[in-house]
Amino acid sequence: MRELDSVDLKSTILQAFSRSPSVTQQAYQLGIGQAQIREAQSAWYPQVGLTANTGNSTQQDFSNSLNNAAAYGLTLSQLVYDFGKTNANVSQQKSTQESYHYKLLATLSDVAEQTATAYLDVLKYQDLTRTVEDNILALEDVRRMSSLRADAGLSTRSDVLQAQSRISGMRSTLKQYQASLSAAKAQLESLTGVKAKYYQPFNASDFDNPVVPENIDYSKIPTVLFAQTQQESASYEVSKAKSNYLPTLSLQASRTRYETNNNPYWNNQIQLQVDAPLYLNCTPKVGH
């Protein structure tokens, strides 16, 4: 827990941003979303792999047979066309990454609101506490004057009792405000990790005028934008599910070395591969 002589509302909110685990999580989620986009885009890049195996293997045709002891080689695969599967996946990941951005903004707004509310509560209960303390001092003066008048026979003791009753009520209210002030400070310290001796007041004129509900632009609210991007991501997921019923075309090339007992040889292949689902079991139906 850091201790400072004084803080203001702006620095307090910034401290809360740096301390909030939700903000940190959403910030890291942005990086994950960018990596997911690159992963989806990598389907269009050539895929290079190494193959190797050992053990007896026999290949036969009409004329002879080959006994292989080991094989190793290099394979290259290039996606040619997949009827929108990869494009839908890339678009889905982009929408998801954009939703992470709006989720971060919504989280920042929530943390700022909680911090500002706690800060204002501290200022409010500080002012209320000082006001009640001043009232108690004023009532103490009234009680002393009433006691002097009663001792001089100028008034009854009821005025003294009434002043004492009011002082007792004010002291009870003071205890409530002090407890509320301690709770507000504890919440603010939990949000920011900072304990201050003085909380600077702010000028309300520095803030914008209150927003009228009729003038709220809901299209710019982070939570609304987050929901919209989630809807877009779901629509791309539907498109990707539909394209799973269509074939995938890819070009494959390989060069493999076969170690035979008599005459080792290389096998070179260049092929157009077509992968087409004939039956997808337990696949949810996609509405049209």
Image (cartoon, rainbow, N blue to C red):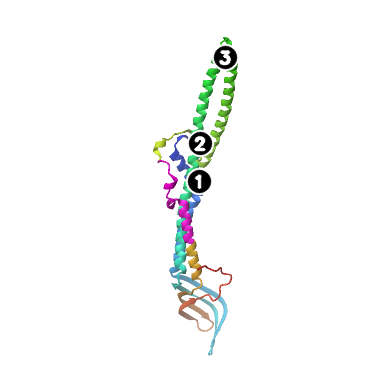
Instruction: Left or right? Give the position of 156 relative to 131.
Output: right
Q: Secondary structure at mark 3?
A: helix
Closer to viewer: mark 1 or mark 3: 3
> Which residue is located at x 54 percent, y 74 percent?
53
Please state which of residues 153 and 55 is positioned toward the viewer in this rendering: 153
Marks 2 and 3 sit apart, C-alpha to C-alpha, by: 38 Å
Q: Main secondary structure of the magenta part?
A: helix
| Label 1 or label 3, whichever comes before in sequence order | 1
Above or below: residue 148 compared with residue 258: above
Name the secondary structure under disc 1. Answer: loop
Q: CA distance from mark 1 to mark 2?
A: 20 Å
Q: Circle 1: is it few (<14), some (14-19), or many (20+) Cα within 10 Å? A: some
Is the Cβ of the residue at disc 1 closer than 8 Å to that at disc 2? no
The first of marks 2 and 3 along the sequence is: 2
Which residue does the numbered mark 2 point to in the structure image? Answer: 121
Magenta-drawn segment: 208-233
Q: For this rendering, which residue is in front, 7 or 64? A: 7
The reply to whether callout 1 and callout 3 are in contact (CB within 8 Å) is no
Residue 280 percent coordinates (x, y): 56, 72
Q: Which residue type does callout 1 highlight?
A: Ser
Residue under the image location 58 percent in, 20 percent down: 162
- Residue drawn where x is 47% and y is 42% of the image: 15
As shown in the figure, which amino acid type bears the numbered disc 3? Ser
Question: Which residue, given by chain and number where applicable, does mark 1 sit on?
Answer: 20
* Residue 10 image offset from top left, x and y in percent: 43, 40
Q: Which residue is mark 3?
A: 147
Which one is nearer the viewer's eye here, 271 or 203?
Answer: 203
Residue 111 point in image, percent of width and height: 49, 45
**x, y percent for residue 226:** 47, 54
User: What's the distance in space between the residues labelled 1 and 3, CA to CA?
Assistant: 56 Å
Q: Is residue 171 above or below residue 97?
A: above
